[in-house]
Amino acid sequence: MLETILAMTVGTCRVELHLPGNNSLKGKRRVIKGLKDRIRGRFNVSVAEVDRLDEWQRATLGIVCVSNNSRLVDETLTKVVNLIETHPDALMLDYEIDLMAH
C-alpha cells in the first residue's frame, strides 16, 4: 500500500489597523465588516477580527490561507495586505506574514 505525502503550507497574516475617522464601536464594526467581506470576496482566505475588539479606532485582523503551493500562499497574503492598504477608512500600522510548511 502506497502512502501519499501531502505537502501543505499554512500562511497567517496579522494586520494592525488604525481607524482615524471612527468614534464608536458601531462605526468600527461597519468598517471592519466591509473590509472583511471585500477580502473574502476577492481571495480564498479566512479573515477575522482577533484583537482590540473594544477599541473604537484600533483593530487587529487575522488572515489565514492554506495551499499545497507555498508561493501561492505568500502571493495571496501579500495581495491581501496590498488591498487593505488601499482602504480609505483604515490606516495600516503594521503587518506580519508567516508561512508554515507541513
Image: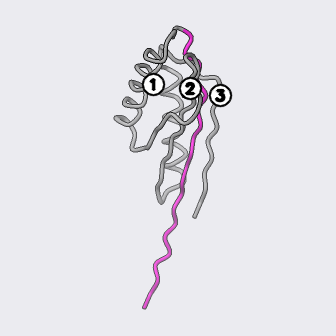
State how far apart marks 1 and 2 are (Cα): 8 Å
Q: Position of residue 54 (x, y in %)?
A: 55, 24
Q: Which residues are magenta?
A: 1-20
Residue at the image point whose x is 45% and y is 25% from the top: 32
Q: Secondary structure at mark 1?
A: helix
**Residue type of the residue flagged with mark 2:** Ala
Disc number at residue 94? 3
Q: Earlier in the sequence, mark 1 or mark 2?
A: 1
Q: Secondary structure at mark 2?
A: strand
**Looking at this rendering, what residue extends furthest in the left direction?**
41
**Residue type of the residue flagged with mark 1:** Ile
Q: Position of residue 90 (x, y in %)?
A: 52, 18
Residue at the image point whose x is 44% and y is 22% from the top: 29
Q: Position of residue 4 (x, y in %)?
A: 46, 78
> Residue beneath label 2, please?
59
Disc number at residue 32? 1
Crowding around mark 1 (Cα neighbors within 10 Å: few <14, some 14 to 19, many 20+) is: many
Q: Position of residue 76 (x, y in %)?
A: 48, 42
Is 81 contained in the magenta span?
no
Q: Earlier in the sequence, mark 3 or mark 2?
A: 2
Q: Are marks 1 and 2 in contact (CB under 8 Å)?
A: yes
Q: Nearer the viewer, mark 1 or mark 3?
A: 1
Q: Are marks 1 and 3 in contact (CB under 8 Å)?
A: no
